[in-house]
Amino acid sequence: MNIRFKITTQLLAAIRTDLARPHAFAMERVGFISTSMAASRDGLVLLAQEYRPVADEDYVPDDTVRVMMGPVAIRKAMQWGLTDRVGIFHVHTHGGTGIPTFSGIDLRESAKFVPSFLNVAPQRAHGALVLSGDAARGQAWLSREGTPSFISEFVEVGAHCRKWGRALPLSDGTRLERQSFLGDMSPQRLADATIGVVGLGGGGSPIVQQLAHIGVGGYVLADPQAIEDTNTNRLVGATLADVEAQTSKVQIAERVIRGLIPDARIAARAVPWQELVDELRDCDVIVGAPDSYGERDQLERFARRNLITYVDVGMDVHDCGTHGHLISGQVILSTPGYPCLRCCGFLTDSRLELEAQRYGAAGGQPQVVWPNGVLASAAVGLIVQRITPWFPAPKPFVYLEYDGNLNTLVSAPYMRLFPNQVGCPHHPADEAGDPFCVLPSHGRPTAALGKLRLKAQHEYTQGATSIRHGPDWAATRSLGQVCEPEADGRRLRPLPGGGGCQFHHPGPDATRASPRERYSS
């Protein structure tokens, strides 16, 4: 089973900074990260939400390693997992560069306390991470009885999309040698990338074509429509024979890709994108070229919940009366942890209420090919900046406005409002993940291959009792090593028996524990 761990650049940088602080007597600092979960096609995605350092007073002396975190620190982490229904990952750093390894002490101690978290939040994955200066390694426990699994891949989401932990595919021969300036390993990085494209008409089809030309290896394509004769003035790759055969737009896009990359990884279905959410969760970037503000709002929310960069592309034609018609458009880069489409004023409640499916006055959603080509090229350029190192300092938030009458594509005035803004009030970090994605309450499934079973439990949002206690809660008490919740489900107490629990409530014998307001007539 593949387990991916995703974290934003800002959160990862804050963790490294905190762990580098000196301590009065401890050799190294440690902390905890809260996580949510989501299902993907082939496993589980863990999404980092928040970091909390272990307080200075919560370190205690130890005979074997001189100093370690004490029982109070672990109890606080358990309380966090219980109260917020989150996964808890212990984290520390070994410094240096490259992918780090766990020490023997790391493996021994984490095996003692991490299973404790499963007793208070059994339907979440918990684990331990070790960082270096530029990478990470981790283990995740999915049940109280099972052994931990190593995390398959780490993804850092920010101005650059960085990955480590998984081997990159081989280079595509000499076909891409003219773009070697994109940087070290750029052909492999592009081949490893997966881009989702929602809407494969005039806006999405040139994006797919350009991504295939530069060597992107993975695609998730969603558009429920088949081609019509009115699409042929702008849909790249379409033919009149496709109109006759009523070929779907996703089939045309796949044909274009395979003409350049025969072995491309493609998940393409002629359905609404909401039926491809598991596939879209595997994407590094999602490009949206839908026909309405409502779809844009939903796409961006989905991307933010799954820590995926979203690129919005769209154009419109406006009737200006005696002044003729005006062509306008936008390309907006929305990165988790930075301003969103609402922050910059592009999405507003009033626009969603009016519903932009009928915006434009020159006919039924007028479209022409050349503005879509300009916007597609700008979008692909932003995507390549995320994936390859050719440009060392890309911006995490970009809002470009297109004026087809003046033939300009420039930064929107709203960009000046966000020169260094970090954070977004519309998409808080604790909204990440799928609230209905939970591990079975009885722990790891018993199937021979040990595949993870995920289920959408609507009672998740209806109350805490079934989630926190479940039918097997009594069995967890027999482990005799951790706390249990109080009757109100909000606090921890030691298990009965007189001796306390091993780590958190030591007994007497225990020793440790524009917008520019779019052009309008």
Image (cartoon, helix red, strand yellow):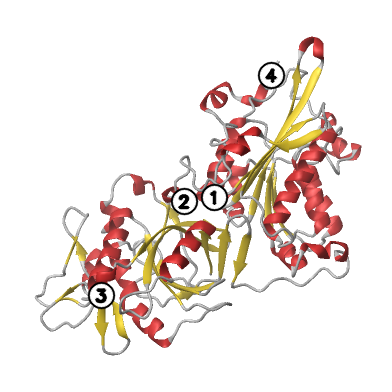
Instruction: Determine whether the residue tagged by mark 4 lies in a helix, strand or loop.
Output: loop
Q: Which residue is mark 2?
A: 432
Which x, y percent locates residue 350?
53, 23
Q: Between marks 3 and 1, how big is the CA–CA gap?
A: 34 Å
Q: Is residue 432 above or below residue 7?
A: above
- For marks 2 and 4 on the same chain, the one whose residue lies earlier in the sequence: 2
- For marks 1 and 2 on the same chain, the one whose residue lies earlier in the sequence: 1
Q: Is residue 509 above or below residue 15?
A: below
Residue 292 located left or right of residue 62: right
267 vs 328, nearest the viewer: 328
- Residue type, label 2: Ala
Instruction: Determine whether the residue tagged by mark 3 lies in a helix, strand or loop.
Output: loop
- Residue type, label 1: Pro
Q: Which residue is mark 4?
A: 520
Q: Are marks 4 and 3 in contact (CB under 8 Å)?
A: no
Q: Which residue is mark 1?
A: 336
Which x, y percent locates residue 433?
47, 52
* Residue 406, quarter of picture: top right
